[in-house]
Amino acid sequence: MSEPRRALVTGITGQDGSYLAEFLLERGYQVYGLVRRASSQRFERIEHLRERVELVTGDLLDQASLSRALTLSRPHEIYNLAAQSFVPTSWTEPVLTAEFSGVGVTRLLECMRQVCPEARFYQASTSEMFGKVREVPQRETTPLYPRSPYGVAKAYAHHITVNYRESYGLYCCSGILFNHESPRRGREFVTRKVSLAAAAIARGRQKGLAMGNLDARRDWGYACDYVDAMWRMLQQESPEDFVIATGEMHTVREVCEIAFSTLGLDWREHVTLDPALLRPAEVDQLVGDASKAREKLGWRPRTSFRELIELMARSDYEAAGSPRT
Ligand code: NAP
Ligand code: G4F
């Protein structure tokens, strides 16, 4: 019997990492996850997988730990999902963001080149790199114009991934993913912030919700659909970069409308505006053209925007339990 394929997932404790680990386990992979040491570990998203995945400690800031993780796991596939991924934090911690989300990728690529050059590498690139967009919709060839320190760090990471492919002939791909959400989304991101608040208000546990720019628009998809695309990119004959997106833009206001109405509420009675939540620079028309992924990977999104927001609101409502008396 042939040995199972091995995958190393950095960022396994995050939204995408947890779904990708499930996806790979279902396909018979032996899954290793890179986790950083913390005084109290938060493994909620992978609690149900703890018996089935091998956790290796390491940090994108520490090259020796990455080298050790690769030596231990001997991966056929490496999925680099770890990053400081919250855009507002990148203005308050720009250097750390550059270290994690930018230079950290070079550390990992350099280790791969030395320890397991035959492995295949996936880099979690982002639509945030398009920033002040040069064309609408954005494609693989659209020039980058990042508008946040996070976007700048990710643009560096994107280019270094391409550079290692072209310089050393490594199998390295960048998936340029547009926003994707789920009930496991971090609580500070807008869709989850709204679904949590709608659920808490419906349960009588919260009064109102302060929001930033309600006119901001994004191309929002479902995280479970998107991890499938990551895997497909590493199964191609040769490495290429792909945009993964729904091709539809919606506003934050629509997120509020759907989440609140799913739970029988009128968002206008609960949402207030807080100028402190506005960003120093916004990105206006992020919307992706995923035709290359459709044609070459056979990938398409399966979950609509409305279905996504409804499922998030219902999930948070269930988790919030019964109303307080
Ligand atoms: P997430 O939930 O914020 O998860 C980030 C992960 O990175 C966590 O597991 C975190 O570990 C880990 N991490 C952070 N700093 C690290 C370090 N120095 N060393 C090792 N691990 C570190 O992010 P996500 O939404 O799943 O996104 C996954 C990736 O896709 C990220 O790179 C993100 O930038 C990118 N991306 C996301 C989207 C989206 O819409 N979700 C779109 C495009 C691209 P802890 O649990 O220890 O904090
Ligand atoms: O949910 P967000 O914080 O996501 P953002 O900034 O688009 O970044 C996410 O998607 C990127 C892909 O393009 C990823 F690379 C990145 O790692 C992350 O996953 O904000 C979405 C929009 C913004 O325009 C923001 O201004 O929602 C607007 N917004 C309005 N009120 C708010 C709020 N965002 C947050 N987080 N909180 C608010 O109260």
Image: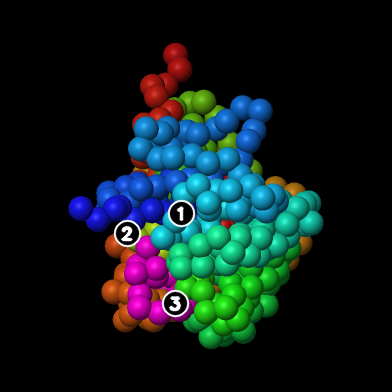
- Which residue is labeled 3 in the image? 239
Instruction: Indicate which label's residue lies in the foreground, 2 or 1.
Output: 1
- Which residue is labeled 2 in the image? 303
For mark 1, give the secondary structure. loop
- Looking at marks 2 and 3 on the same chain, the residue that comes earlier in the sequence is marked by 3
The answer to whether residue 11 of the structure is visible from this angle is no
In magenta, the rendered stretch is 231-253
| Mark 3 close to ligand 1, CB under 8 Å | no
Image point (41%, 54%), residue name: 7
Q: Residues within 10 Å of mark 1 (few under 14, many from 20)?
A: some
Query: On the rendered structure, is 172 left or right of 53?
Result: right
User: Is residue 100 in the magenta section?
Assistant: no
- Looking at marks 2 and 1 on the same chain, the residue that comes earlier in the sequence is marked by 1
Kindly check if marks 2 and 1 are in contact, taking CB atoms under 8 A apart as contact. no
Report x, y in % for residue 221.
Answer: 41, 61
User: Is residue 240 in the magenta section?
Assistant: yes
- Which residue is labeled 1 in the image? 74
